[in-house]
Structures are given as structure tokens and as C-alpha cells.
Amino acid sequence: MNYLKTLAVAAIAATGVTLSSASARAMEEIVIGYVDDLSSLVAEAGNDSLNGVRIAVEEANRAGGINGRPIRLVTYDGKVDPQLTSTFVTRVIVDDEAIVVLGGNVSGAVPATIQIVTEEMVPFFSMSAAADEFTDPPKPYFFRFGPSNSQDAVAVADLIAASGFETVGIINNSLPFGLDGANAITAALGAHGIEVIINETYEVNATDLSPQVAKLRDADPDAIVVWPYPADGGRVIRTMAQLDVDKPTVIARVALFDTFRELAGEAADGVMVPNTVDTSRADVRAMLDVFAERFGQRPPTMYIAMGYDGANAAITALGEASVQAAIEAGDLHAARQALLAAMETIGSFESIQGAPGNRLQFGPGRRQGLQGDSIFVWAEVQDGGLITADLEAFAN
Amino acid sequence: MVTEARLDILGILVLSGLTNGSVYALVGLSLALTYGASRVINFAQGEFVMLGALATVLFVTTVALPMLVSIPLVLVICAMVGLMLERFAYRPLVARNAPPLTVMIGTLACASIMVGAALLVWGPNQYFVPNAFSLDGITVAGITSTPQQLAIIASFAILMLLIWLLLYRTTFGLAIRAVGIDPEVSKLMGIRAERVVSFAFVFSAVIGGLAGILVGPLLGGHVSMGVVLTIKGFMAVILGGMGSPFAAAAGGLAIGLLEATVAFYGNSLYAEPIIFGLILLTLIVRPAGLLGEWEAMRR
């Protein structure tokens, strides 16, 4: 019996030592979590953003970390599965003791993530999940670094209005990104007095989209807006060419991916794509050069920029005195709360998205970082690549 | 003029329905072939479509082999993986008297392993799958399509003919049907039932691989593309009738045509609930599926 008691006391003591040393270890380094789709349908976006985060973290660590503490990036692949994403978000918060979690390229997984980070009181920096409801009304622990659907929609509507088109047809996939995007574009076009005369939705894995495109053709709109994922976007554009639907066309940001352009082929020439990455900016080019050297050549997608911006904002906020004091004291909860407060008190963060000098703006009640009308630059698909858009040619 | 326009729409709907339906039918008939011989639904069937599409990327894009050389290589790889599935998952489970549900979970595990292995080889990005036939539009009798899409329909039709000849005009086909009806009695009649089951797995894998080669250029190649196709193929099997490749194929075509019709006259958003509702109604009226009883009589 005495032996058992001694064993129990020793076990409790050992657990205490382990816990205290784990806590001390956690404060010797700063953990940033990244949970996103890294292997499923949205993996191209997830990996681009993750690699953008890696570049920012490596730069910070090369510069000596934050007040001498190195940053450790912990990553998990939540695929497009909300349940799996929730499990990994909980794990990175509870087991890995991340002070801040990044990720969120999958709209479908974001609501569950918001619930967890709110319960655990941990700031979450989201990338491209664009549904407006995530930031309007604002959620205290949720910060977005990419454009929202309504911002995309306003940019699309502005371009179409400036081009003098009066009627529009929208075709989108049946995923949340497609449905929410179509609603936002309809509302933004309505503000310009432009009528959406047809809105077609299709199942993302359908091999043939002729019925939907035939309806679009028969409606005969002045311009067409396509809101797809990369591969189905390629099928829409190809089917449009097959059915002789030759209209000025705007497509969602997914057209920045190679997959879309390879699948669409020559049929995609002249299609307009909103991007937040302005490659005429010297700082953007420099960052993309580093990215290419580290991870190989990639198209200049906004997903890379979102990751880089998000990680740099986190690093800036982590450097605040209040956050550092909490880290010094080994108080993880206080560090997370201090980081949340720092995001609001600092408010303005450097960004490689949008026009030169554009900054991310956060504050009390403001969780959408990109603001104003200098966010987007228009790209045009040409010969399988991306060029600076010719807006006049689009209007004519 | 109005009639011409309606005929154009009818042509588009039929062609679209046949294209989508042929893909579902190819997966459905390969599921039914395996089920017919082993009484097991192979939940890894869609993964052979993925393997076919991504192996085409490997041979044509990465290794730069001609398409005509690549296609047999892709089919051989699919056949080998199909044989491995039968030898290392199906056969050991059946040898230990595992119930069919357990064996099906075994095939589900194989599906996950195949996706994981594909992830290691090809990574998470979506690929453009090189096309065996042109993707440029051609107009025949006023209806526009692509040779690649027409090849899907033609391949399906040719495969149906080949399977019919195999099942009803050869002794081996008679053995396949006998094993499908009663494996124990067929063994007593001297039929080597395990060989028939091996053949069913390998042949189904090859059909899946062929479907991947054909549909890959349209869908894009991705490690997770198989799951949805397995579900659609399974829907085709249930609607058409279990156990017969022809009934499953009919189910696949019916789903494809229904999808195209709902997409044009309604909204694709509601296509799946409508199709599932119709499947439920069909099964209430005909529990064995559209052609299940007829096929059972034929056998």
C-alpha cells in the first residue's frame, strides 16, 4: 500500500514537473498555428498561403525572432472537412499552445473554426474565406486578410458599370464560395442599376455544363460573370467557347491558378480576373522572388500575399510590450488577449496587397483588413498566362 | 425557327446527359461487376478513376511518353493495383469469414490508402490531365460537342458491347454469371470462383482507369476526385439494380439525363435532392431497382 502511495505521489510530482517544464518551454518559443486545406480541393490556395506565412516567419527568425524568442510554426491539414479542421484548430490551441492561429481558405470550415476560437479566446487570422457574414457583424477573434465577397463584387460591378454594360449573366458553382459570390455580385450590380437577367448554378463535379451555358447563351446578356473553383471554371469557359458564347467575361480570383488556365486553354483568352497582388510594386516583386527561390515559381496569387500579410501582422502584434510581458510571465491566456488588444491598438499594418502604400486596417468592430477602393488590380488571361488587363478593350 | 431552337436544346440536353451519364455508368457498371462476382461494393472504385487520370499526367506530362504508349501503361497500373486490392484486402478478409459489410469497410480503407499514396506521388494540387482526343468544339447535325466528350460516350457504348459479349457469348462469361448467382454451387460445378472474383476486381479497375483517362481532361486530376464518382456510381447501381452491369449502366445514364434536364428546366442546385427523391420513389415501387428483376430473370 505504501509502495502504491509513493508511486502515486511520484507520478503526481512527475506530472507537475512535466507540466511546468512544458509551460516554460512554450514560453521559450512563440508558437503560431496554421490549419487549412493542404491536400484537398482548396489545397492550392492553402499551400500558397502557408508558404507565404513561412516566408514571413523565416524572415523574422533570421532577424532574431521576437525579442530573442524564435517563432515555431505548427501546421495541420484540415482538408475541406469542417470536423477535421475543428479537431486540428482545437489541437493547435490546446496541445501546441499557439498564441494565434492562421488559415481559413475554406469557407465551409470557417464557421466551426470561429466557434472554437471564440470559446478558447484565441485570435484567428483568416485568409481567403470570403463570405461577408464572417466579418459583418464582426466576430471578436476573427480577422480577415483577403478581400470579402462584397469587395470582390463591388470591384466586378464597378468594372462592368465603367464598361457600359447594362445586363449581366452570372454562372457559379453550388459551393458556398459560388453561391455567396453570386448573391454579392447581384447586390453590387443592382447598386449600379445593372440587371442580372440570368443566374445559373451548377454542381462542381459535373463533366458537362452545356445545359447551364445554353441557358446563359439564350438569355443573351451584355457581359458574363463566372464564380467557380479552378477546374470547374475551366469547364465553364470551354463550354462557353463550344456554344459560341462570345461575351466580355469576368471570373473569380481562382483563375489566378494554373489549373484553371490549363483546363480552359485558349478559350480563356481575354477573361478578366481581380487580383490583390500588383506585380509592378518593387516590394511585391522582391517578396515573390524570395518565394520562387524557396518554393519554386508560382503565379502571383493573392493567397501568397494574404499569408505573408497575416503572418507579418501577427509578428508585429506579438512584438508589442503587453504581449511580450505576458509571454515573459508564461501566461498563455494573457498573451492571446494582449495580442487581440494589440491588433486593435496598432490598427494599421503593412500589406503587400493592393496599390503601393495600401495598409490593412483593423480596430474595434473592424475585422476586415483590406479597405477602400485601392485593393484590386485587374489581370487578364492571355496565352495561358496572366497580363495586366486592358480595360478599354474589355469595354469594347 | 422555334422548332430548330428546341431541337438544338434537346440535342444539348441529350448529349450533356449522355456525357455525364456515361461517366456515372462506367463507374456504376464496374461497381456492379465486382458486386456481381463477390457480393461486395468496392468503395475504392472511384479511386481507380483518380489513378487513371493522375497516371496519365505521370506518363504523358512528367515522363513525356506518347499518349498511345501511356494509355496501356496506365491501364496496366490500374490492373495491378486492382489485383493488389483483391489479394491483400478482399481475399484475406473473406478467408477469415468476414461478413460483406466488413469487407466493404476494407475496400473503404483501401480507398484511403490509395488517396494517401497518390498524395505522396502527385501532391495536393489539381492537374491538367492531357487529352487523348481534341477538346476543341465540333458541330455535328447542329449540335456542338468535343471529340473528348464523344469519346466518353463511344467508349462506354463499346465497353457495354464487350461486356455483353463476354458475359453471354463466352464460357468464362457463363462462369462469371454462375459465380454471381451462387458461388458455392458454381465451385461444385468445377468453376474456380476465386479466379472469377480476381478477374472482376482487375477488370473493374481497368474500366475505372479508362474512365480516368477520358474524364480527367474535363474534370482535372486531383487526389480526392474519386469519392464523388464512387457516390455517383453507387447511385447508378442502386437506381438501375444491384448485380448487373447493364442495369447499373442504365441507372447511370438515367441520372445523367435527369441532371441535364433539371439543370436546364430548373436549377442544378436542386438536381441532387430531386434525383435522390426519384431514386427513393423508384425503389419504393421497384425495390430491386429499375432493371433489377428483369436482369435477375435473364440470368
Image (cartoon, rainbow, N blue to C red):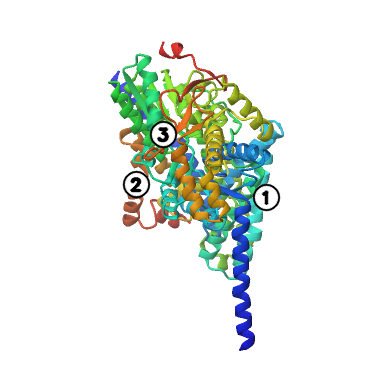
Pointer 2 and pointer 1 on the same chain = yes
| Along the line of sight, the residue nearer the viewer: A128 or B263 | A128
Q: Nearer the viewer, mark 2 or mark 1?
A: 2
Crowding at dot 1, Cα within 10 Å, few <14 / some 14-19 / many 20+, comes out as some
The dot on residue A148 is: 3
Q: CA distance from mark 1 to mark 3?
A: 47 Å
Residue at 37% from the left image edge and 26% from the top image edge: A154
Q: Quadrant of residue A294?
A: top right
Q: Nearer the viewer, mark 3 or mark 2?
A: 3
Chain letter of disc 1 in the image: B
Q: To which residue does mark 1 refer?
A: B80
Q: Residue A2: horizontal and vertical position, in percent? A: 62, 88
Q: To which residue does mark 2 refer?
A: B273
Q: Is residue A191 left or right of residue B55?
A: left
| Along the line of sight, the residue nearer the viewer: B277 or A50 | A50
Give the SS element for disc 3.
Answer: loop
Give the SS element for disc 1.
Answer: helix
**Would residue B166 be visible to someone looking at this image?**
yes
Q: Residue A167: horizontal and vertical position, in percent? A: 31, 20
Judge whether A117 appears above or below B71 on screen. Answer: below
| Along the line of sight, the residue nearer the viewer: B70 or A178 | A178
Q: Is residue A370 left or right of residue B9?
A: right
Pointer 1 and pointer 3 on the same chain = no
Chain letter of disc 3 in the image: A
Q: Is residue A222 left or right of residue A44?
A: left
Crowding at dot 2, Cα within 10 Å, few <14 / some 14-19 / many 20+, comes out as few
Q: Residue furthest bottom?
A: A1
Give the SS element for disc 2.
Answer: helix
